[in-house]
Amino acid sequence: MATVRKDASIMIVDDTPANLRLLDGMLSEQGYNVRPFPGGRFALKAAQNDPPDLILLDINMPEMDGYEVCTKLKSKEKTRDIPIIFISALNKMEDKMEAFSIGGVDYITKPFQFEEVQARVDTHLQLHYLQKQLKRHNNELESLVQEKIGEVLSVKEEISQAQLATIVAMSRLAESRDDDTGKHIERVQAFCQILSTKMSESPEYQDVVDEEYTLNLAQASPLHDIGKVGIPDGVLCKPGKLSDEEFDIMRTHTVLGSDTLEAVRSEYPNNAFINMGIDVARSHHEKWNGKGYPDGLAGDDIPLCARIMAIADVYDALRSERCYKKGFPHEKSRDIIIEDAGTHFDPNLCEIFKKVELDFKATHELMST
């Protein structure tokens, strides 16, 4: 996980002087370089001249509200990647959804607790630095290719490993914010390998699921919940059942995750690992009957890797203890998956799951101790 620089530049935009003074004082005490602005126009100009590492943005402001400020920042190349946390007294779900839809990474409701503000600032600074590190790796790759065209293959492999390490670090950042996940990433990765290896023995899948496919899936599987880095702590870490509105926010992690990886694919469109990671992140909550999310895909329209991930992810969720439920034994978890063949899960994959269910059981027990 990236270390948060306490001298990071944080811009605060709020037309209420008391709020500016309060946030400025609290964040400055933590060592941050705080830049307060009472309105959007001044903030936009300052951000273009010297982009901050993160912006705390009020919504209700005269002349230009926070939504307009955010939209303008996202339209400029110099400022489009700056994480923006909205901080507002508006508490309606439509206000929060609007904030996320135009590019906000988080939403804090006034009156706020400073501990919450600091925790969310730290989380999004960590993610921002990881994204910058990934971009730096990509730039280094282009430079090395130009300088050493004769060594391009080895250079690509070297940078590919750096990219992989950075992206997986982002996934672990998402996992670390959810106290319930434990060794979820490692177990799901193992389940995907078990299932895809067995699939490669079946005539139906032999032409698709080969050794390379299995390797790419093993590398891509840790990315399935990478979008959770963008889910507010109050939703992600809530003990107990989510409300309908909170669940709507939680469901956006699929799109947030795929959008994050799409930025990488724009630089490396032929990278099989990234392409599979996008499918896994976006579609692992789709259902065979078309009643999943985010796109309502059905049947074979759901990417195969996401159908594999669905079984692996749900099996681990059923077996694992949560603050609101006890973990189910293997037999009950197995029966639930088999009963949902043709509704939630690909029925053909469920048949293969039956052949390796004892491997799932042994792996879960081994990796949960």
Image: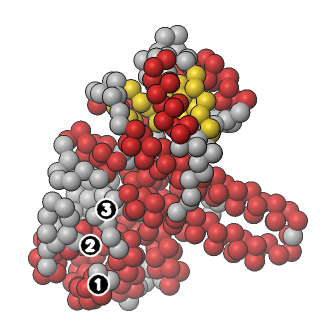
Mark 1 touches mark 3? (CB < 8 Å):
no
**Image quadrant for the C terminus?**
bottom left
- Give amino acid for label 2: Asp
Residue at x-position 59% and y-position 48%: 6
Disc 3 target residue: 179
Mark toward the viewer: 2 or 1: 1
Label total for image: 3
Marks 2/1: CA–CA distance:
14 Å
Nearest the viewer among 219 and 364 is: 364
Give the secondary structure at mark 2. Answer: helix
Residue 242 rendering spot, x and y as whole percentages: 20, 47
Q: Nearer the viewer, residue 181 or 109?
A: 109
Residue lying at 46% horizontally and 76% vertically, measured from the top left: 218
Tell me which label, 3 or 2, sits earlier in the chain. Answer: 3
Coordinates of residue 285 in the picture (x, y in percent):
30, 58
> Which residue is most to the top?
63
Name the residue tied to disc 1: 369
| 99 lies left or right of 47 | left
Place residue 345 in its image quadrant. Answer: bottom left
Q: In this view of the protein, can residue 9 be seen by the observer?
A: yes
Kindly report the distance in space between the C-alpha atoms of the residues bearing marks 3 and 2. Answer: 15 Å
* Residue annotated with mark 2: 316
Which amino acid lies under the numbered mark 3 shown in the image of this protein? Asp
